[in-house]
Amino acid sequence: MTATPFAPAIKPFSASSDDFVTYTTARHWIGGHWRDPISNTAVQDVINPRFGKVIAQVKMGAADDVDAAVQAGAAAARDWGQWPIRDRAHVLYRLRELMLKNLDELAWLLSHENGKVFGEAKAEVEKGIECVEYGCSLPNLAAGNQLEVSRGVACELAYVPLGVVAGVTPFNFPMMVPLWMLPQALVGGNSFVLKPSERVPLSTLRLAELLAQAGLPAGVFNMVQGGREVVEALCDHPDIKALGFVGSTKVAKAVYGRASANGMRALCLGGAKNHLIVVPDADLQVTAENIVASFTGCAGQRCMAASVLLAVGDVDHILAAVRDRAAKITVGKDLGPVTTAAARERINRYIDQAEKAGAKVTLDGRTSGAGANDAGGYWVGPTIIEGVTPEMAAAREEIFGPVLSVIRVPNLDKAIEIENASPYGNASSIYTSSGDLARRVIDRVEAGMCGVNIGVPVPREPFGFGGWNDSCFGHGNITGWDGYRFWTRQRKLTSKWALQRDQNWMS
Ligand code: NAD
């Protein structure tokens, strides 16, 4: 099975440093062509957060564009769904090679549109490649079960495509989060409509062309640019059979409600407020390094980032090492900007409020970010707030910046009580050298992804990514095997070819 050779229309991104470079306008990708919106004339700026300057523009779509993408998807899905699963997976093998070949270019583009530093951007693309590799393995995993359930009667299980499915993704992982969904959905035999974040629509322009170059037939992958209007049109479209969403809790909940009310299968991952518990026997170096990497990585804009540190008993030596290490981070070099001016104001507001409420800012990202802000861009340096109490907003709400709120607690029970009072349930980590203690903590915390001596406990492929409580609406994980099950439906076939006449009605 081969598709028509594809000639890329979008020029590769030219930057190979942080120096400011502009890029092409983001448009829809429908049926294998770049298209302007049908009726919506709205255009939004895409800002490079390092400079606060316009890198590109995005042409915003509407319901009519969603419908055009769904129609293209429906037409393509009929043939694509008939391809043998191995042939569908071969497209991903080729995508993997193309992504590796263009790794640096993809990483620079991602770094410029999102702001994360080049090393982080490269790691994101590599993590996306890992998701593609999982998709390559699906033909080996998706073999159904078959059993003779009575004499001469066999039951057999098959995973069947849904048809046209859709995904909506956030600003903080422009490449990896779409690739949480695409491999399983495509190898599962569906066509896909992606709505990337309007703040970072550029990396997926290149992804669309790489998929086409890899041999994905036109119309199997489509992309509609835009914001809320497009998302609501996706939720309401009668021909979309499943919707994956990743973003903030408020929107995840609304999207889940709307899509489900329309009878659509939905899995919507939301925000987070991750707690790390530190006890006195924790290894000093490993713990300090880990905690700092967790709350400052990607400028704290990760749903798995450390947000609250629950300091149990006398851990002053560890807190001192955390402060010391975080203070050595160079804003601009080790730590990128936050996404928008509004995000910077929000983060600074949380710090101000905590300070006013009596907490102590022992490392102040408002001042370390200030110098960088003079040159443009949206900067907040690493921030540690100590003496935080559970009632403060800094302890309860998702700040989504490089801020660590430290709450002192007398014992583990209190730490677990505070953690479990949070409505979120994404990640939780314990730092200790006692395996027994670690196990007792992990057994009691309300979080879907737990870590022992690790600050960002992301389950890597083939383990599925997904939180609990207000961090996830819908059933199951979005990656791994759950992802494949989400994007397919199961057909059970019961057949009898040895037509024995002596069997009863059940056989
Ligand atoms: P967001 O919720 O603002 O936007 C996510 C997507 O929803 C975007 O594509 C956006 O265009 C769309 N959208 C925004 N408002 C909408 C509305 N009112 N109705 C319908 N659609 C709407 O999130 P964001 O700021 O892009 O991303 C950051 C958030 O995502 C954080 O809360 C973070 O924790 C969360 N996140 C969660 C995970 C996870 O796996 N749980 C992963 C990454 C990010």
Image: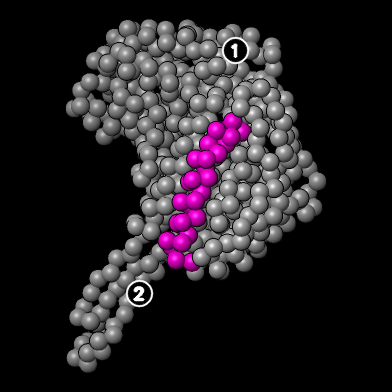
**Residue 265 horizontal/vertical position (percent):** 50, 57
Q: Name the residue under label 2.
A: 493
Identify the element where label 2 is drawn: strand
Q: Mark 1 points at which residue?
A: 369
Label pair 1/2, CB-CB below 8 angstroms: no
Is 99 inside the magenta-drawn segment? yes
Using the rendered view, name the quadrant where residue 453 is placed.
top left
Range of residues picked out in magenta = 83-109
Identify the element where label 1 is drawn: helix
Q: In this view, does 342 lie to the left or right of 253?
A: right
Q: In this view, does 405 lie to the left or right of 337?
A: left
Quadrant the C terminus occupies: bottom left
Residue name at image x 64 percent, y 44 percent: 205
Residue name at image x 59 percent, y 8 percent: 367
Indicate whether 445 appears above or below 77. Answer: above
The residue lying toward the viewer, choosing from 268 and 66, is 66
Residue name at image x 65 percent, y 62 percent: 72
**Residue 312 horizontal/vertical position (percent):** 30, 16
Using the rendered view, name the quadrant where residue 263 is placed.
bottom right
Can see residue 246?
no
The residue lying toward the viewer, choosing from 436 and 258, is 436
Q: How crowded is mark 2: few (under 14 residues within 10 Å), some or many (20 or more)?
A: few
Determine the main secondary structure of the stretch shown in magenta: helix
**Residue 65 horizontal/vertical position (percent):** 71, 55
The residue sitting at the bottom extreme is: 501
Using the rendered view, name the quadrant where residue 352 is placed.
top right
